[in-house]
Amino acid sequence: KNAAYKNAKPSKHLKIFINPFSGTCKASKVFDSEVKPIFDAAGCTYDITITEKINHAREIMQTIDLKPFDVIVGISGDGIIHEIINGLLERENINDATIPIGVIPAGSGNALNICLQGEAVYKSLQHSALTIIKGVPMKIDMCSITQGDKRYFSFMSQTFGVIADCDLGTENLRWMGSMRFIFGALKAIFEGRRYSCELAMKIAESNKEIIRDTYRKEYNSNSQSVPMSRDNRYGTVNDPIPDDWTIITDDVSTILGGKVPWIGKGTIPFPCALPNDGLIDLLVARRDKLSSRIKSINFMTEMELGNHIKMKEIDYYKVEAFRLTPKNSTDGYISIDGEKVDFAPFQVEALPQLINILSI
Ligand code: ADP
Ligand code: MG
């Protein structure tokens, strides 16, 4: 940890995105009353964009002159962070993407902030503001995703099945705040939904015991740095599946890929995720193993602390890449970082150490 502080560069000049639509739509108010005074006291300057539409932050980040800024800040949920990251990685010069990103939690989904600050100070705007001012960067891996002819970068999660339904099938329940995800999960469980797909994986480790022992170590901030590259090593979703990938075709309750432990408050699907091990954690709940409602509810409750990986019904892998192809259905939900994408085959691979996040 101490080694990381050597890289600290106090943030003075901030480019800020506020999403007025985030969470319960109070991001601007929250900024004025709780965050701005801290930035002012630290003598920061800032340039604020109130986002006006989906992809507004992403478009600005593709071309904005970064020279005047030390950090890019999202006052939002995970959606704007996703946009900032995608915009940065779509710039002509990949080296521009080294500018650190800071997170002020103002959405209904603030998973990245929970991962950075811990659940104890969840939604503490002051802690988050101080973290940004302190300016300690941490390199994190990205997931590179291809779907049709589109490409996305994902810092958090890719979901298919029950969990995607909870996130996206409940947009109309925004007034419920984060309760809407729980409500969505219960609804899906009681309807006993099943999902058909083909899952192909380039497995790095499939033994859960080994994964828990080897990977659940303290994050090592001294891990060797690698050259920045946004090139896919495994091609795209439109290429043939490589011969050495493992293929599963069973019906599932849910499939989740992720790079961070939390994907929401009280939801830790990836207890063994590390910010820069170059791998994606992949959770597979097969429908035949998780057949009863009791088991499904058990899975959801155990996930609150990440203990579901001890359940024999749940498979957990470390993979370099995977491809998910929905079968027998033309409508359903797939989410990337909590945002809805097309219900169509997609392929994911881990790209090491592409983005800098300000952490405590
Ligand atoms: P939440 O955690 O509440 O979902 P996010 O920050 O994730 O909040 O944002 C949700 C969505 O709002 C994102 O898809 C983003 O692109 C979109 N968005 C940004 N600005 C606006 C706006 N002015 N009106 C509507 N949606 C917007
Ligand atoms: Mg969101």
Image (tube, helix red, strand yellow):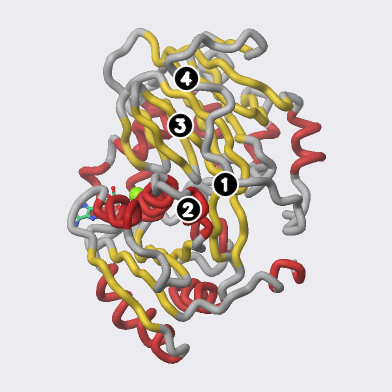
Q: Residues within 10 Å of mark 4 (few under 14, many from 20)?
A: many
Left or right: residue 112 compared with residue 45: right
Res. 178 in view: no
Sequence order check, earlier mark of 3 and 2 = 2
Q: Which corner quadrant of the image does residue 332 belong to?
A: top left
Marks 2 and 4, how far apart in space?
23 Å
Q: Amino acid at mark 4?
A: Leu
Report the disc number at residue 104: none
Sequence order check, earlier mark of 1 and 2 = 2
Question: Secondary structure under badge 4?
Answer: strand
Q: Is residue 45 above or below residue 242?
A: below
Q: Amino acid at mark 3?
A: Ile
Q: Nearer the viewer, mark 1 or mark 3?
A: 3
Res. 149 in view: yes
Left or right: residue 278 compared with residue 329: right
Q: Check if mark 1's residue and mark 2's residue have beta carbons within 8 Å.
A: yes
Marks 1 and 3, how far apart in space?
16 Å
The residue at 47%/56% (across/down) is 96
Q: Amino acid at mark 2?
A: Ala
Residue topped by disc 1: 260
Q: Check if mark 1's residue and mark 3's residue have beta carbons within 8 Å.
A: no
The residue at 36%/37% (across/down) is 166
Question: Secondary structure under badge 1?
Answer: loop
Residue topped by disc 3: 145
Residue topped by disc 4: 324
The residue at 49%/35% (across/down) is 144
